[in-house]
Amino acid sequence: MKDLLHPLGLVLASTGFLLLLRDLRRDRRDRALVALSVAYLASALSYAISLTPVWVRVDAFFGVTNIAVPLAQSCVIGVLVAQAVVLLHWAVPDGQKTRSRTRLLVLAGVAVIATLGVLFTLLTPAEQRPADFTLYYVHDPYYQAYLTLYITTYTVAEIALAVGCARQARRATSPWIARGLRTISVGAVITLGYSAIRISSVLGAVFGFDVRELEPYAWICGDIGAAVTQVGYFLPTVAARAGEARVWVREHLAYRRLGPLWAELRRAVPSIALLEPPRQLGEVLRLRGVGFHVYRRTVEIRDAQIELRPYLDPDAREQAELRRTAQGLTDPDLAAAVTADQLHDALVRQARGARVEEPAGWADARLPSRTADEETRLLLRVAAHFSPPSDPVPPARDAKDPTGASS
């Protein structure tokens, strides 16, 4: 059972650690993030060492039979300490108190690991038992002391984790953080099944009853509970990554949808483009966002509208209003569609050099756009209705002024 479940935990823990490395590179001063990374790494090591093929090789490397047991369980103690440190940083805002309590937790963990090492040395197990080590050696008094210390530490830490996360979940302002904390609590409670079975094995050795049939359920509770706990820690991060991915996709879609309108306006008014835009495919392949370029594109489209205002024909706007209204459009789509028609007509007039004496206003000016996001959404509506002139030509210069300036 161990070799069936441990690979799942190894994959989860390793994946979590690798994903956290990105955030850790950005901010190594975040002690909670460092502790969480240590928890995932130590968990991955504990799973890896406990796998039978690795267990055998670790024993051979150190030349000590079953040395994989204290090594793997020392990693588990490291996981428990790191999880407690994470919860401590989340719960206690006072930096000084957090640092002092972190030192106490680390010292306690080191003391437990050292004691386990001493008890294991006294045990001196001679037969390699990667599949049923606990059942085989549970009748040895030194191993009973070893297992009692390990399981007591494990149980106390998991109970503290379950209670602490449940409390923090009630205070959390983010729904995803609250869900993650509750998931951690559930996982910690499930692992208590592992503790109960291991304690029963010690009691069974002392009082003469057998719990051998419960051995598979010990690994099920331990591994499934640990996996649920790891998922809980990562839920807020996954939610944040999903939000970032949605923003990334939305930015690229906006950049692409504004492209035809922007390109047509740039062709007519080259001065609007202060920066050469990147090739979108290259940005996609590099997984880069284009938020800045979307912003530049909206600004440049608005700049082009200013330049094209001398070519806004009031009659063209009136006809567009009637035509689009007859199509059943209402604001904001009505104003966006009329603006798109005005742009089409203005580009044609600009190419012909046909200015109007009293220019009309842009139809979309009546729609509020208080933020950059609102401005982008409005221009996306305009772009959706825009159709470029069928035969675009370079803008004609005014006959009275060779520079193209108005007379």
Image (spheres, rainbow, N blue to C red):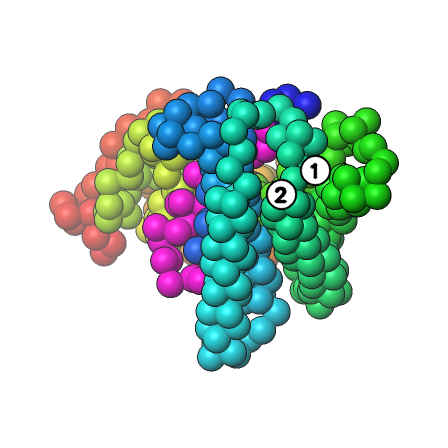
Residue at image location 24% in from the left, 48% down from the top: 274
Q: CA distance from mark 2 to mark 1?
A: 7 Å
For image coordinates 37% across by 32% down, the residue present is 62
Quarter occupied by residue 170: bottom right
Question: Along the line of sight, which residue is nearer the eye, 260 or 109?
Answer: 109
Span colored in magenta: 5-31
Specify the amino acid type for callout 2: Tyr
The quarter in which the N terminus is drawn is top right
Element on which disc 1 rests: loop
Q: Quadrant of residue 268?
A: top left
Residue 255 percent location from the top left of the image:
43, 38
| Residue plotted at (47% across, 40% down) | 71
Quadrant of the image occupied by residue 290: top left
Queried whether the magenta region covers residue 10, the answer comes back as: yes
State the residue at coordinates (48%, 48%).
117
Element under label 2? helix
Q: Is residue 21 magenta?
A: yes
How far across and how far down the image is residue 103, in percent? 46, 69
- Answer yes or no: is residue 175 visible: no
| Picture disc at residue 143 | 2
Residue picked out by circle 1? 139
Whether residue 86 sits left or right of residue 132 in the image: it is left
Query: How many marks are shown on the rendered structure?
Result: 2
The residue type indicated by label 1 comes to His
